[in-house]
Image: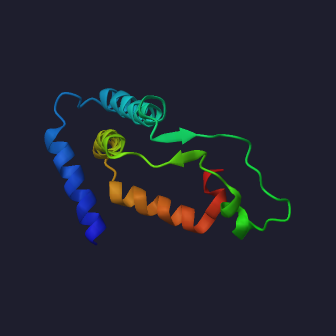
Amino acid sequence: MHDNKCCLDFQSIVDDYLIRHRSVLDVLTKYQETSARVNRAVAKAVTGCGCIQVSAARQSVPESASYSELKEHMSSHLLGETCPQCREVITKELGHSLFYLAALCNLTGLSLHEVMQREYKNVKTLGVFHLS
C-alpha cells in the first residue's frame, strides 16, 4: 500500500506542475529527451569523469552453465563506481525521466503503480522470457 501512495503522490504532483508540456506529443518527446540525457550522464561518467569504465566484450558463458548459474557469468561491462558528483547527475536525470513517465501515465489514464506491479508480475512469472 505504501508503494501505491508514493506513486499516487508522485503522479499527483506531476499533474499539478506539468503546465507547459501538457500535450501528449510534448510529453512523448520530453520523455525521449530525458532518456537521452540519462544516457549522456552515464557516458560522461565514463568519458568525462572516468569514475566508471566500460570494458565490453562478448559475454562468455560456459556451455555447461545451468540457467540458475547464468547471472554469475554475465557482465554489466562496467568497472568502478560512480563518484558522488556523477551519481548526483545520473540521479537527477533519472528523476526527470520519471517525471515524464508519470506525466505520460497521467495523460493516458494509467496508474504508474499498476504499470510497475504488472511488469513485476510479468518478470516474476516469465523470468528471462519477459522481454521476448
Percent position of residue 111, x then y: 32, 55
Which residue, as the protein is rendered here, is positioned at the far bottom? 1
Q: Quadrant of residue 19?
A: top left
The residue positioned 32% from the left and 39% from the top of the image is 89
Q: Is residue 62 left or right of residue 12?
A: right
95 or 127, which lies in front?
95
The residue positioned 19% from the left and 44% from the top of the image is 15
Q: Is residue 91 left or right of residue 131?
A: left
- 88 relative to 39, above or below: below
35 or 121, which lies in front?
35
Which residue, as the protein is rendered here, is positioned at the far left? 16
Percent position of residue 115, x then y: 41, 56
Q: Quadrant of residue 33?
A: top left
- 97 relative to 80, above or below: above
Percent position of residue 27, x then y: 31, 32
Q: Tell me which colouring the rendered structure shows.
A: rainbow
Percent position of residue 106, x then y: 28, 45
Identify the image quadrant of the N terminus: bottom left
24 or 9, which lies in front?
9
The residue positioned 70% from the left and 70% from the top of the image is 68
Picture mark count: 0
59 or 101, which lies in front?
59
